[in-house]
Image (tube, grey):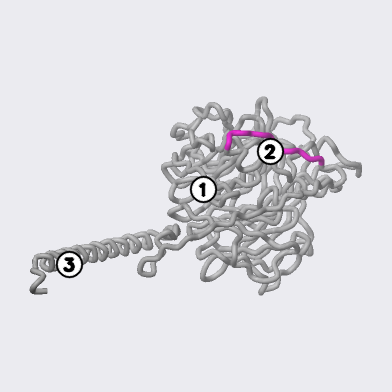
Amino acid sequence: MSWRPTYRSSKFRNVYGKVANREHCFDGVPITKNVHDNHFCAVNSKFLAVVTESAGGGSFIVIPVSQSGRLDSHYPKVCGHQGNVLDIKWNPFFENIIASCSEDTSVRVWEIPEGGLRRNMTEAVLELYGHSRRVGLIEWHPTSSGILFSAGYDYKILIWNLEIGDPVKMIDCHADIILSMSFNTDGSLLATSCKDKKLRVIEPRSGRVLQQQANCKNHRVNRVVFLGNMKRLLTTGVSRWNTRQIALWDQEDLSMPIAEEDIDGLSGLLFPFYDADTHMLYLAGKGDGNIRYFEITTEKPYIQYLMEFRSPAPQKGLGVMPKHGLDVSACEVYRFYKLVTLKGLIEPVSMIVPRRSDTYQEDIYPMTAGTEPALSASEWLSGIDRDPILMSMKDGYHRPNRLVFKAPVKEKKAMVVNGIDLLENVPPRTENELLRMFFRQQDELRRLKEELTTKDVRIRQLELELNNLKNVSPNNV
């Protein structure tokens, strides 16, 4: 490891990870065996959602966070997708609203009833179609209540306005599959990593690329995350010697990284998690059992290694509890929900700052982003940017959110020809389906041309008969 063995004063130097007791874990969960590089898990203060293994389509389960223990084998699922579910994300402002994307090329928005599911849910609040290939990533805008981003295997990012239920912008600047997306604090900038080995900073409303990393041979980028208001980016990737590596970048100059640190020689993908309140960075490798954590500073050495949480159980993915769902009385500053596929187990792992006093620790709990949106979708689309509305963590403060999510009602008109709805905008899910659709359309065009030719001949025949009738003398009629 190349980090310097220097010691400096830090309130987070002794942070340690604590695994929840067995009765507070979630057991018997049929976690998906999909090899897609994603977390397959999403958490908020009410619910835990996990993508599950299922036959004949894709599904995920939603469990109330308070209902830990062994899961019933017939526990109800959200199962409306026709293909495997690849990503799920909770709306940061409406805790009962979750979005999912799938191999069936659709993005769907679901409303989970209070208390969780009592039966299988198949009807989504919104079904969003626009990608021509499977959708691998979704992200909610950090300050606007009705803006959702989706990235597909068609190399495009679509921006959805959920107030009208339609895409309002397409970002088409990537030459390969988009691997990750991250927003800055107010959502005015979007950073993406791509399989073409380039890191980009994009102005999302216009789709303009503000900065683009040249093809850097020293660091091949896999995942990217914005570091709050530091105007810095952090990426995880691979060095030229195939060691796992992290790199720090200036968001206004991606020509060379500010700092690079080699981590180890393992092959699993490194997922970065950044806490803007404590300036702590957590690194968790797919298939690893450990979680490393660092402190990010604006001065050299920039990345300060703190400690490592170790566990023998390898993780497939990790969900993160939002700040307002943490246990302030235990000095908990971060909480992971670790997916252990081999055991069908989900373990909560709390990151705790050891303190002797039982009083509220203001130095480790500054004002944090709350559950109230700063903007509506139409305001953000008109060009307005605002920082998140902050809330205090003291006394377990929760500001009641009086907003209600309302899905737009779309009037669907049908135009059916030979049993085919011509206005149905559902793209093919696979390349084979695309070819079948192409040949079906060719057959339809050929049939319509033949029908048109037949009708032209019939029209000419009728015109001739009409002329013959006119030429016949009235005496002979």
Which dot marks residue 462?
Answer: 3
Query: In the orientation shown, which residue stands out farthest toward the front?
Result: 475
Query: Within 10 Å of the Cα at label 1, are there few (<14), some (14-19), or many (20+) other Cα atoms?
Result: some
Q: Is residue 261 visible?
A: no
Residue 392, compared with residue 127, is above or below; it is above
Instruction: Say which residue appears at 57% left-offset and 40% top-offset.
Output: 224
Which dot marks residue 294?
Answer: 2
Which label's residue is closer to the chain start, 2 or 3?
2
For the stretch drawn in magenta, the main secondary structure is: loop
Please report the bounds of the magenta region as a residue range.
382-392
Instruction: Say which residue appears at 50% left-offset and 46% top-offset.
Output: 158
Q: Amino acid at mark 3?
A: Leu
Instruction: Say which residue appears at 38% left-offset and 62% top-offset.
Output: 433
Comparing 346 with 45, the one in front is 45
Helix or strand or loop: what does disc 1 sit on? strand
Instruction: Say which residue appears at 70% left-offset and 30% top-offset.
Output: 6
Query: Within 10 Å of the Cα at label 3, are there few (<14), some (14-19), or many (20+) other Cα atoms?
Result: few
In the picture, measured across the screen, residue 289 lies left or right of residue 238, that is right
Q: Amino acid at mark 2?
A: Phe
Q: Report the quarter where the N terminus lies.
A: top right
Nearest-to-viewer mark from 1 and 2: 1
